[in-house]
Amino acid sequence: MPQIMIEVPEQLTERIGEVKAHLSEEVTRWCSQSSAIPAEVYRHVLEFLAQSPSPQEIVDFKLAPATQERIRELLGKNRERELTAEESAELDNYERLNRFVRKFKLQAMKDLRATS
């Protein structure tokens, strides 16, 4: 299997190691979906993580306002049972991204509790 190498700060390397088994699976799913989330959404998350954020910064992290608005729109349509198949796949992708980010946030919360 080909490997892709990226440079990340040491602190991020440790966190990625904790979710390594799931990371490859998540990236594979993101790339294989027919209705992918816009690339800038992934770029926003990866650029944030590559900056070696503090645990508090990770806990405080939010997606861009435009992305949050799109998710609210999709959730509203979902509640009204008005999602198209493409929108449903898009919402599924946002849910996967949320689970991925939540793993980092949970670890950051543990780190904050351990240092307080």
Image (cartoon, rainbow, N blue to C red):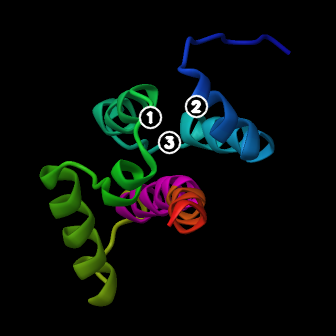
User: Mark 3 or 1, which is nearer the eye?
Assistant: 1
Asked if the residue under mark 1 is in contact with the one under mark 2, i.e. CB atoms within 8 Å, the reply is no
Query: Does 20 appear above or below 56?
Result: above
101 within the magenta span: yes
- Mark 1 neighbour density, 10 Å: few (under 14) some (14–19) many (20 or more): many
Task: Identify the residue at image location x=55%, y=53%.
Answer: 104
- Circle 3: residue type: Ser
Q: Mark 1: which secondary structure?
A: helix
Dominant SS type (magenta): helix
Residue that label 1 marks: 49
CA–CA distance between discs 2 and 1?
10 Å
Please give the name of the residue rendered at 25% of the width and 78% of the height, measured from the top-left corner: 77
> Which badge, 2 or 1, is on the more N-terminal residue?
2
Q: Are marks 3 and 1 in contact (CB under 8 Å)?
A: no
Residue on which disc 2 sits: 11
Disc 3: which residue: 34
